[in-house]
Amino acid sequence: MIPMEQRELGRTKRNVSVVGQGTWQLGGDWGDVREADALGVLDAAVEAGVTFFDTADVYGDGRSEQLIGRYLKERPDAGVFVATKMGRRADQVPENYTLENFRAWNDRSRANLGVDTLDLVQLHCPPTPVYSSQEVYDALDTLVAEQRVAAYAVSVETCAEALTAIARPGVASVQIILNPFRLKPLDEVLPAAREAGVGIIARVPLASGLLSGKYTADTVFAPGDHRTYNRHGEAFDQGETFSGVDYGTGVAAAAEFAALAPEGATPAQTALRWIIQQPGVTSVIPGARSTEQARANAAAAALDPLPQSTLDAVRDLYDRRFRAAVHDRW
């Protein structure tokens, strides 16, 4: 296994790798992934130094959790911290965020992952009022007291939701979209998290693949891929797909971003390196559908920090192409 920088994940007091492995892809919402290929991705990530997997109970209706559980049973020496999510298995109304439902969802995830206690459970982008509900946090505290979970956290859509959660003393970390096309969290969320000792998990780091520089205006995605069916928020929040940016604009901006990649680094690795060096970020969780992608993502952790000129160029790109479209929404 290749050593990788580890950072403390907020109030969990556990260390995780600065590049983690996102596993939404392994559930099937990005096109079909064979079981052997999915397990190969997890193994390649671990061999490359990854010690952090992020999943959810709705990724492939539990398939992602089950694959992780199978892998960790076969590799008990892997030393992986697993964060899962709950809440999207019910209608998205605050009334469904109850202790009874939490226990039921929790039982299913623990069975899928093959563990008695989950390392971390995150509320999965619930309705905004949930972040302010004392009853919800009381229920989460109960899960910890019952040793069903070691810690709890939130995954959010907006910076306002993140700030509300950070103010709660039991929230260990916040998962939020952060990439060179979504800079708003840098303004308030990351500073607030650092001040409170809350971890930051950066999700959708490649803007659903745009920042890989591999797509063109003519690229066609599979019908079952959310990049086909959710471009305008038809199935869930638009911000989850291409970070909410217009696809055509994103492709053009991605070509501009690719030119910023240092010698020997891909555009995707450059985007991950940019995220890693933002003050307050604990871990970034790119997905991968092949072992090659998993290894390449992990290698971003070993890149030299990007110079100030590149950071300034990213800010300029965002200001010109995206600020007006996305800054006030998320």
Image: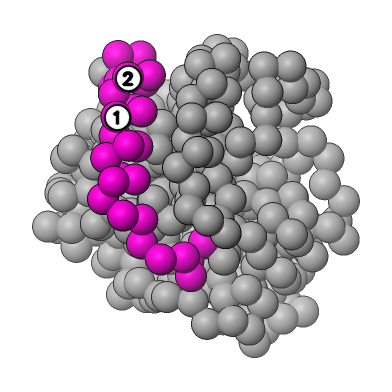
Amino acid type, mark 1:
Asp
Q: Which of 137 and 324 is in front in this view?
A: 324
In the rendered image, which residue does mark 1 sit on? 316
Q: Work out whether 159 lies above or below 5.
A: above
- Residue range of the region highlighted in magenta in the rendering: 300-327
Q: Residues within 10 Å of mark 2 (few under 14, many from 20)?
A: few
Tags 1 and 2 touching, CB below 8 Å: yes
Q: Which residue is drawn at 71% across and 69% down?
A: 44
How many other residues sit within 10 Å of disc 1, few (<14), some (14-19) or many (≥20)? Answer: few
Q: Residue furthest left?
A: 195
| Vertical comparison of 94 with 101: above or below | above
Q: Position of residue 211 (x, y in %)?
A: 54, 37
Per the image, label 1 sits on a secondary structure element best described as helix
- Residue 55 visible (yes or no): no
Disc 1 to disc 2, how far (Cα)? 6 Å
326 vs 135, left or right, is right
160 or 21, which lies in front? 21
Question: Which residue is the site of mark 2?
Answer: 320
* Res 246 visible: yes
Magenta includes 214?
no
x and y percentages locating residue 194 in the rendered image: 18, 58
